[in-house]
Image (cartoon, rainbow, N blue to C red):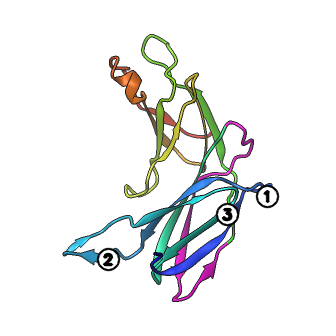
Amino acid sequence: IPIGYKLFGNIRDSKQRRLDLVIFITPRILPLAGGTASGQIGMAFVMNGKYTTYLPAGEYDLNLVPIMERSYGGAATVTQVQLTMPAADKSLDMTLPDGLILTGRVRDAAGVALPSAFVQLRDLGAPESTPPISTRADSRGIYRVAVPAGTYNLHAVPSPAIAAAGPANLLPVPFGPR
């Protein structure tokens, strides 16, 4: 049973293509539960550009993270939005800005590609509480992600199946646009 008010809408990229993405929802003033802050309260999935979720009235930070499927040729980037949810249903349509496309191949110390490796980028200029931008490499170890302009710390971790076979000796790599 949904709790709160309905938040719904459409999300597209700069070329008006419908996006698949995840919305991470965090209250701006953390409610107290048993005397401690409860932290992140939820997420919503956007499929074919449409989403619906339910929120209590309040102030929220939304982190929109596009899913970069191989077939998607755009550059929609992670976007942060501040939301005031009224005590009523609300429609919120958004167009995500384009970012810089970062692609690469994850390899171990011997130069062997690591399929399904998990890649995280942390914006060095963002507050520590900002979640990292994450993606997963394909079966050839190749990843593709769109990021806002900035300087990032990139860290790759082998998939659990590969990690069980032995250490990959991967090091964080700084990245910044030219």
Q: Which residues are magenta?
A: 70-92
Tell me where residue 104 appears, x and y as whole percent. Answer: 59, 28
Foreground residue, 35 or 97? 35
Identify the residue at horizontal 67%, vertical 59% (top origin): 96
Q: Can you identify the residue that label 2 sits on?
A: 31
Amino acid at pointer 2: Pro
Using a 10 Å C-alpha cutoff, classify the residue at mark 1 as few (fewer than 14 neighbours), some (14 to 19) or many (20 or more). few
Q: Which mark is residue 156?
A: none
Residue closer to the observer: 123 or 46: 46
Where disc 2 sits, the SS reads loop
- Residue bearing the label numbered 1: 16
Q: Is residue 170 visible?
A: no
Classed neighbour count for the residue bearing mark 3: other residues with Cα under 10 Å, few (<14), some (14–19), many (≥20): some
State the residue lying farthest toward the bottom. Answer: 87
Q: Is residue 80 magenta?
A: yes
Foreground disc of the pair 3, 1: 3
Q: Residue under label 3, please give it.
A: 50
